[in-house]
Amino acid sequence: MRNKHLLLCVFSLCMMGVASAQTQPTAKPKLVVGIVIDQMRWDYLYRFNDLYGANGLKRLLNKGFSCENTLIPYVPTYTAVGHTCVYTGSVPAYTGIVGNNWFDKTTNTNVYCTDDSTVNPVGSNTKGGKMSPENLWVTTITDELRLSNNFKSKVIGIAMKDRGAILPAGHSANAAYWYDDKSGKWISSTYYMQQLPDWVSQFNAKDVAGNYMKKDWNTLLPINKYDLSSADDEPYENAIKGEKTVTFPHRLSTIGDADKYESFKTTPFANSFTFDFAKSAIENEALGKNTVPDFLAVSISSTDYIGHSFGPNSVEIEDTYLRLDNDIADFLQYLDTKVGKGNYLVFLTADHGVAHIPAFLAEHKIPGGVFNEGEVSRELNKMIEDEFGMKNVVQSLQNYQVYLNADEISKQGKDLSAVKKSVIRFLAAKPFIIHVFDTRELASTTMPEPQKTMMGNGFNPKRSGDIQFTFKPGYFDGGKKGTTHGLWNPYDAHIPLLWYGWNIKPGKTNRETYMTDIAATVAALLQIQMPSGCVGKVITELTK
């Protein structure tokens, strides 16, 4: 009887221990680091893989979790929209960020995504400091983290581009910092602070960007190792500002003071510079030493500047990614030392991909081409004037949409629907355009998937244009040199998504996942609320 009583006591104690363990809060990472590589195509993970080191992208691929088939679910696939989607889990229809720029019909002006005339620059006297997240309608995962613990978490956004720092950091961030290409310094705005912290001023005083520009850019490896790229001297590449050649070595040290800080953006050293500043932020803001998780949002912008100028098949891009791989390895090692292995959570993704340069495609008998939005806009206005007797009815043509002056059309007693039909007919006659439709009639427009869903997700009745058009693959708005992005096609919409660190088990999935799923998954991992406009779904492979 005594033994039975003893066993009952032991059993009860065990069950109390189990119950106690179940009520303990789940441990969380000390620091979450979001890394967005601007213009990184998914195939760069594998195309240059043989030349990557063991501790950068390969470390993330081999010891982390890769979502191999992650797609962007909207158009246009631009920088501001991508950064917004990653951190909100939402699409332009809800976020209000419909492009890097859009036309505001209430003021008849073009709007830049992070413009805010009510704030002033901090650390600069340029207009580039009058920025904030005011145009963003929804919360970010960084906002939700702050909301979850009564704003105890520290959140900082860093990027060379203002939109790459501001939109990820969200509305309630402690700070966002971006690059002033007039002075070579990191700046902010009065939305966040009245003056730069001492550590930022001290960093700026070192003129790190200027020092990087004192050395020339040569290839990291002997140039004959770059056999995955086109010839170094291609007529369809754009030179770095201040240079007269598109070939290695790039004589950065000869670029004059008037151009050097702007030219710096189109070098791989600007990526190192960004990671330098990110480390300084972790150190000086004591990120990862909080009682709750902190969040550092880092965007690597120079991959985009270099990609636009030289294209995805250039020696410059191949060399840039080899150097970026080294930067990532160095940054991960820093996190190991400063925050501790297993104490930080990293996700790495891209805001969009990029198209091949059409002239490169032509060399290999692959379809592609360009058109000029300005020319098409002028042609449309002339057609409308000839047909309806009204001048300058097309107010803007951007984001592959036409903005019409509906007020002027009404004032002159003309039929808006008739004008729209003429515009649609005119654009449909262009050989490179496939679909043209009234944006408010998308539901009844015959269009294949995934285009139709992506168009719907990208349409915002307050900020989008009146008429949308799409192209043959390989075509875009641009010039004879360089390339761009913005369309639904896989080269623009298929992005990498890697997870590493805290509670992440190695593996991969080839099932379809979406950019909108990133914020939803971070929310699940941190056990916090999804952002207010989130439409993504949790990547359950990461939460099992």
Image (cartoon, rainbow, N blue to C red):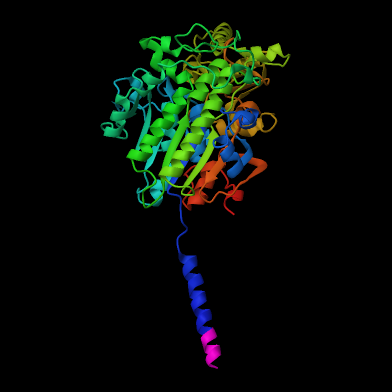
Residue 414, position as x, y percentages in the image: 53, 15
For the stretch drawn in magenta, the main secondary structure is helix
User: Is residue 516 among what the camera can see?
Assistant: yes
Viewer-proximal residue among 493 and 385: 493
Classify 336 as above or below 264. below
Classify 393 as above or below 61. above
Name the residue at 49% across, 45% down. Answer: 345
Question: What range is drawn magenta here?
Answer: 1-7
Viewer-proximal residue among 8 and 334: 334
Q: Residue furthest bottom?
A: 1
Instruction: Give the left or right position of residue 480, taking residue 205 as reference.
Output: right
Residue 322, position as x, y percentages in the image: 56, 27
Q: Residue furthest front?
A: 222
Image quarter in which the C terminus is found: bottom right
The picture quadrant where one finds residue 486 is top right
Image quarter in which the N terminus is found: bottom right
Name the residue at 33% across, 40% down. Answer: 285
The picture quadrant where one finds residue 196 is top left
